[in-house]
Image (cartoon, rainbow, N blue to C red):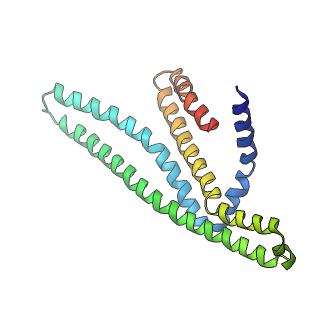
Amino acid sequence: MTRLDEIRLSQAARQARWLPRTLRLVWQAAPGWTTGWAAMLIVQGLLPVAVVYLTRAVVDSLVAAMGSGGEGGTLRPALTWIALMAGVLLLREVLRVVAGYVRAAQSEHVQDHIHDRIHRHSAEADLAFYETPEFYDHLHRARFEARHRPLELLENLGRLVQDGITLVAMAVVLVAYAWWLPLALLVSTAPALWIVIRH
């Protein structure tokens, strides 16, 4: 590990301690939108596993239907699995659009909440503070950072949670085939995790 990697990891560790406070702030600003966002993260994390599972069922049913020449009602199960796959793919796209709307609404509520808090605290401050450049600089930085910093942290956390749910669900599915497959999956995701932590 290089010195630059150590510095980045220490910066990430310092910023991670703000995560509970950020989550509390987001919850205070938009509890309903945050609940919807969390529910969508769970569903979106499970959908890739459903696609993988349904792909296997579609292929198996199509092979069975082709093997029997499409006779004896073997085509009906294949069509059912194909319809389920189409429904899951459609649901994934709909949820992607709805999640964008939810994130935008949540972001607006959080920004308004933070701006209200900054305004309230700046109104309570003594007038002498406004005469010092340091205080004005802090106030300006707080207003600027409030636009994107909490939401950036929340977005990264959301991606991490969704990908973690997908990884765990995929591991559960793979255990049914061989006990070592989830370990191989975990090892294969390690380089991507390292890049995320590093940057």
Q: Residue at x 71, y 37 (%)?
A: 9
Residue 167: percent from the left, percent from the top? 53, 35
Q: Is 137 drawn above or below residue 189 in the view shown?
A: below
The answer to whether residue 133 is visible is yes
Nearer the observer, 147 or 62:
147
Give whichever of 196, 84 is nearer the camera. Answer: 196
Which corner quadrant holds the C terminus? top right
Left or right of residue 28, residue 104 in this image: left
Query: Whole-percent x and y of residue 127?
Result: 84, 79
Residue that appears at 22% across and 41% down: 79
Judge whether residue 30 can be spotted in this image.
no
Estimate the x, y position of residue 80 in percent, counting from the top left.
26, 43
Q: Which residue is drawn at the image coordinates 83% and 74% (left, top)? A: 131
In which image quadrant can residue 21 be found?
bottom right
What residue sits 47% from the left and 26% below the top?
A: 176
Q: Nearer the viewer, residue 140 or 122?
A: 140
For the image shown, how many numbered marks are present on the structure? 0
Residue 169 drawn at (x, y percent): 51, 37
Q: Is residue 61 above or below residue 119?
A: above
| In this rendering, position of residue 177 left or right of residue 29 | left
Q: Quadrant of the N terminus?
A: top right
